[in-house]
Amino acid sequence: ESEESTFRTRQARSLELTREAREYLAGGVASSRQSTAPHPFWVDRGVGSRIWDQDGNEFVDLHGGHGAMLVGHSHPAIVRAGAERLGLGTHFGQPVPDAIVVARNLSERFGLPQWRFNSSGTEATHDAVRLMRAITGRRILLKTEGGYHGHHESVLVSLSNSGDELGPVSRPASPLSGAGVLREFADWTRVVPWNDLGVLESVLEECGDDVAGIIVEPILMNFGMVRPDPGYLEGVRALTRRYGCLLAYDEVKSGLVVDPGGATALLGVRPDIVCLAKAFGGGIACGAIGGTSEVGEFIASGKYLQIGTFNGNPLHMAMSRAALTEVLTPQAYATTYARTESLARTLGELLSASGRPGYVDSIGAKGMITFAPHRVATYRDFLSVNQEIGRLHWLFQHNRGVFMPPWGAGQPWLVSVQHTDEDLDLVAGNFEELVARMPK
Ligand code: PLP
């Protein structure tokens, strides 16, 4: 309670703006995930690793704009590229040479030769799903129980548990996030538990000849940060080959962040299609799909309409080009990963010394504190995470100058290439104070 009242005192202007906004913005925010409890806080600007709110408070930003800001805020190379492009015109509906630079760079990172662009993670997974159906001529999509892949109908399915653990049932994500998703869409999306090859195989035995493909985050980042068990992705790949269906990786969150070539390069199991968004835009709305040469040929043949007014627009391409070639360099990755790992180690030591259940993990620039009695391997395990401590931790950090990702949705934090040791010392210092104050 006292943390909540500190929040309210520090965010007086934000509360005023929220009230004012309600008159014109539904719920007082521009998008549903912009609300942070007890009320949204309104931002003024961001530079480097830090952001400032409308009350003049300064924060170390570990939220990273829903995990998009790997380049940090207002990076000089990105500002230069964006400003140059603004002066040259931002949209023509025709390609610009930067698109070749970006696609080549992504090909080298992900080992997939053919690319197309769009404008968001949702568009990327939408393209991947429709493409898999178009290429195979089959109807069923498989996805992971609890896995989030954006807000279109085929994937807003079974974001929570339903049915038996070994025989989960597909249903529109509900009650909040599945409103408007027809039962009929859920019927064509079958759900399987993560890390369970046995269930996947039995579903494929039952209806594999009508399965177009499976979409997975190769490292889950939407109910905590959950790695595949050893051999799991290899098994998924082998089963998709056996049943003639395709494999799409949703690397909207993990791509460029867990490794310069995403989980695709890190784990070494190549999908047919990879979906990207968030970090590769250098801070602007972005999206992409990468595919094998077969996938590229299918698109090139004109049999699939991969289309969008702003696809590959010059501003997106210029900012992505600067991010990929000037900012996200091997040196930047090395220092960022070392910092993230060191923060996770420190937090993990503090947590285990406190005797509280939980663990801390990091992969590349992503990290996560999970307040659970055991490691989370599936969505059902995620339900054992203590959200109350998570919420308190979020507020505690916020009141002491650190903006963390929302606690309940199980989102990992992101360390940008512009964070410093001093930034991360603040995070660790706050955490130390919190665990010391919490009753045993
Ligand atoms: N896929 C994953 C794994 C995501 O985490 C998200 C968003 O958080 C999306 C897709 C949707 O991306 P967007 O919000 O850009 O539409």
Image (cartoon, rainbow, N blue to C red):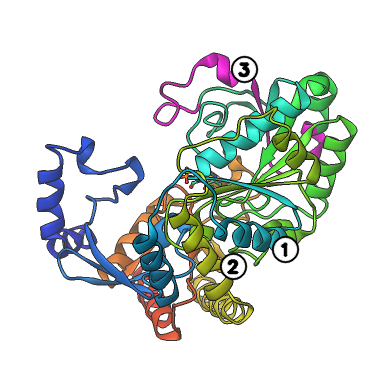
**Alpha-carbon span between mark 2 and mark 3:** 36 Å
Does the beta carbon of the residue at mark 2 sit less than 8 Å from ligand 1?
no
Q: Under tag 2, what secondary structure? A: strand
Viewer-closest of 408 and 353: 408
Q: Is residue 175 magenta?
A: yes
Q: Nearer the viewer, mark 2 or mark 3?
A: 3
Local packing at callout 2 (Cα closer than 10 Å; few below 14, some 14-19, many 20+) is many
Name the amino acid type tagged 3: Asp
Give percent across and percent down for residue 37. 27, 50
**Alpha-carbon span between mark 1 and mark 3:** 37 Å
Name the amino acid type tagged 1: Glu
Name the amino acid type tagged 2: Ser
Q: Quadrant of residue 427?
A: bottom left
Q: Under tag 3, what secondary structure? A: helix
- Report the magenta residues as a range: 173-200
Q: Under tag 1, what secondary structure? A: helix
Give percent across and percent down for residue 233. 78, 48
Which disc number belongs to residue 97?
none
Give percent across and percent down for residue 391. 36, 55
Q: Is residue 188 magenta?
A: yes
Q: Earlier in the sequence, mark 2 or mark 3?
A: 3
Give the residue number, with chain letter if any, for mark 2: 362
**Residue sitting at x 41%, y 74%:** 75
Q: Earlier in the sequence, mark 1 or mark 3?
A: 1
Q: Quadrant of residue 423?
A: bottom left
Q: Nearer the viewer, mark 2 or mark 1?
A: 1
Which disc number belongs to residue 187?
3
Q: Is residue 409 left or right of residue 61?
A: right
**Alpha-carbon span between mark 2 and mark 1:** 24 Å
